Image: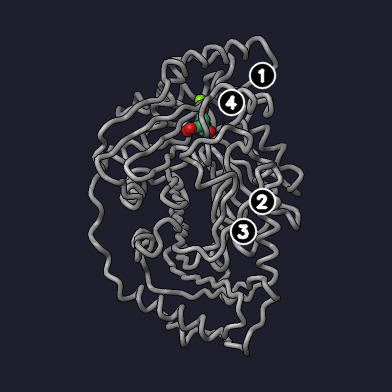
Amino acid sequence: MTKSLSQANFAIETEHTSNEGIDKLFSYTFKIDSRHPIDFFTYNQPAFTGRRFFWKSSDQSSWIVGIGVSHVFYGKNTNERFSEIQEQWETLINDAEIENPYEIPGTGPLLFGGFSFDPESKKEKEWQSYGNSLFYLPKYMLTANDEQYYLTINFMDQSASSKGMLLDEAFQFVNQLENWKVTSSDTPINIKDSDEIGKDEWVHTVKDIVKDLTETDLQKVVFARKMKLRFADQASSSYVLQQLIDQQPTSFIFAMEAEESCFLGASPERLVKKTGDHVLSTCLAGSMGRSKNVDKDNELGNFLLKDKKNLFEHELVVSMIENALKPYCVEMNIPEKPILMKTPDIQHLYTPVSGKTKPESSIFQIVKDLHPTPALGGVPTNAAMKVIREKENMDRGFYAAPLGWADYRGNGEFIVAIRSGILKEKEAVLFAGCGLVPGSVPKDELVETGIKFLPMLRALRGEKE
Ligand SMILES: C=C(O[C@@H]1C=C(C(=O)O)C=C[C@H]1O)C(=O)O
Ligand SMILES: [Mg+2]
């Protein structure tokens, strides 16, 4: 560790006092020696399992791992949930005592969590621990940023205890962390059976929706399905995370535990990143499989770049995101045409939309106005949401919804949580969806969603390419 806590530049002031009955946040950030994020995630599992999160950015530059939870934030079951989370967060931060000498986004007090795709959808037991919005202020958080490592410790202290006591606890944690030896890596998962739930009925419903698309003002519906897996033993989330990191290097790798469940995945789709007054949203819609033969793969990619059905599917997303971001921006940049984004299993049409934001633009308000983009919902939004609610016959939970982080300085990054699944004990449920537009061919959409199960399936199987 480059600086012991006791030497850290902390002005241990006199006794602090907190407003009567309102928890006060004390947060300390300091640099530490390198520590692999997965090792930090698995530190002292008996104490922290069920209250952890993991985040790796798609360009590998930023890793954020939280173990233990100092405060949980919930929103109501309406569209007010985004503002509610923001208000709770701002109230806590305004009264906090924060020691963070580093200007690194994702250090210091930070919220990590997500929202359900549709608070009005029917609820199923697999998502009961997550609700419609769930965010954690972590107790201990590792931030790795361009190979520099920072530890943030957050204490919620209702009593008028001394800061010194809190710092002693932090000091002990750092000491234990330093001396902790990583145990051997987990073993591969033995999948006993798998079931693509209601596959035939799904194809039939897709046919009905595509027919509606040609006969009503409905322009696009993103329609998803799920797959259930059963294992011989309890699946290890850290094993699956390591496999996702190894197999999906250009995707966001994420995990969020809630009680006995762990929602995790490898999403290629950033909803929004806000760093200071710079905002970036990346439109991803329109898909094509890959080929191990380079010429064939290029042929598939070039077809995708010219295909009318996929270009229409994509354009609806770009124009919605442009309109949603415009009120927050003093300037915007949107490329004329999409390019290809290739991941190991699938390739997409990709358009980055960036801008310079007005002061006081909150990432939670931007997320609210973006969700759901037509890449995950459809056009018109409310009509598409109605079709999904009535015909998808499943609870998407946090799948395809905003998940990510916001720090106390207003920086943050949210993805849409696709190429994902939820693990609980010896079972997993995986989710995959596709954009239906006039001209969609049901069997092609079945194949496309089958490919979108692969990132999680291959990670669970420990299967290299
Ligand atoms: C809905 C998913 O993917 C979305 C739909 C896409 C499409 O239909 O072409 C492509 C990328 C995502 O925006 C999913 O992976 O589950
Ligand atoms: Mg598609």
Whether tag 2 and tag 4 are in contact, CB under 8 A, the answer is no
Tell which tag, 1 or 3, sits nearer the viewer.
1
Tell whether label 3 touches label 4 (CB within 8 Å).
Answer: no
Where is mark 4, residue-wise?
388
Q: What SS does tag 3 mark?
A: loop
Q: Specify few, some or many for label 2: CA neighbours under 10 Å numbering under 14, 14-19, or 20 or more.
A: many
Q: Using residue 100 as the reference point, say whether residue 321 is left or right of it.
A: right
- The numbered mark, 2 or 1, whose residue comes first in the sequence reads 1
- Amino acid type at circle 4 is Ile
Q: Earlier in the sequence, mark 2 or mark 4?
A: 2
Residue on which disc 3 sits: 411
Residue at mark 1: 218
Q: Which mark is residue 364?
A: 2
Amino acid bearing label 1: Leu
Q: Is residue 345 above or below residue 223?
A: below
User: For the residue labelled by badge 1, is the local secondary structure a helix, a strand or a loop?
Assistant: loop
**Does the numbered disc 4 mark a residue whose Cβ is under 8 Å from ligand 1?**
no
**Callout 4: 10 Å neighbours few (<14), some, many (20+)?**
many
Q: Nearer the viewer, mark 3 or mark 2?
A: 2
Indicate the quadrant containing the N terminus: top left, top right, bottom left or bottom right: bottom left
Crowd around label 1: few <14 · some 14–19 · many ≥20 (10 Å): many
Q: Earlier in the sequence, mark 4 or mark 1?
A: 1
Circle 4 sits in a helix, a strand or a loop, which is it?
helix
Residue 189 vs residue 200: left or right? left
Q: Please tell me whether residue 217 is drawn above or below residue 77 in the rendered image.
A: above
CB under 8 Å between discs 4 and 1: no
Q: What's the residue at 59%, 55% (across, down)?
A: 412
